[in-house]
Image: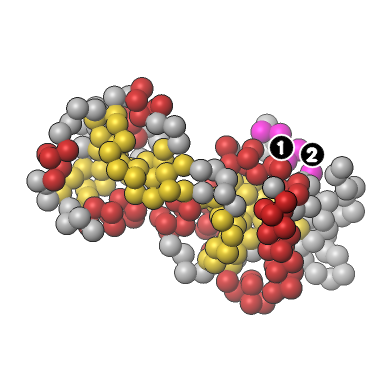
Amino acid sequence: MDQPFTTTGTEQANGAVPLVLALPKGRILKELGPLLARSGIHPAADFHDEKSRRLRFETSDPMLDVVRVRSFDVATFVAFGAAQIGICGADVLMEFDYPEIYAPLDLGIGKCRVSVAEPEGQPAADRARLSRVGVATKYPNIARRHFAARGIQAEVVHLNGAMELAPAMGLSNLIVDLVQTGSTLKANGLVETEVIAPVTSRLIVNRTALKTQPEAIGAWLARFRAALEAA
């Protein structure tokens, strides 16, 4: 049962400021529910209300607030110290590669993969002869690194959505995107041709915060580890 709230996130307890945990909106947040509960994190009731315009929420622990942001923004909040702890996909960490972030725990949820997809029926040999290729993606750094390792220059068209349309509309030869079931690719005449990396969600920590608040952050890491073991 959720514990009663004893204070709000903007108040201080014993002169200390609450830690901030950044959580991703959408599918991952729904999967996170049981893990958060086992870790003793019970956000305010309107946290799960998608119509709520609030982005920062108090929890049943007076020394922890949570913020609800886009998955890509979780890493930025943690890297720049706006949040001391966060949860995001390994794809986000691969894309940004922030040195300020430490990722000690693989939570094993949100399983999917970053993959290359091409129009169905396109001969694989065609790409093997290319020195450059047009790639539509929201992962420009991952795409460039992946193709550079194969001696191919990636000409990136940076899109935040609807990547599957790009090859048919003449924007790119192929796409690099997050794939879970592959049904969206199939519906748009694409086929997954290469897996760049498997993806799961990770617990991430700001390195400076870990040094300056080791006991507080270490306690939360211990809670998450225990919650994973209890799953």
Magenta span covers which residues?
Answer: 44-50
Above or below, 135 relative to 150:
above
Tell me what residue is drawn at x 90 percent, y 53 percent: 6
In the rendered image, which quarter contains the N terminus?
top right
User: Residue 222: percent from the left, percent from the top?
Assistant: 71, 64
**Label 1–label 2 contact, CB within 8 A:** yes
Tell me what residue is drawn at x 71 percent, y 37 percent: 48
Q: Quadrant of residue 173?
A: top left
User: Residue 57: percent from the left, percent from the top?
Assistant: 74, 48
Q: Residue furthest bottom?
A: 211
**Colour scheme of the rendered structure:** secondary structure
Residue at disc 1, secondary structure: helix
10 Å crowding of disc 2: few (<14), some (14-19), many (20+): few
Tell me what residue is drawn at x 26 percent, y 43 percent: 135
Is residue 13 one of those drawn in magenta?
no
Q: Which residue is mark 1?
A: 48
Q: Which residue is mark 2?
A: 45
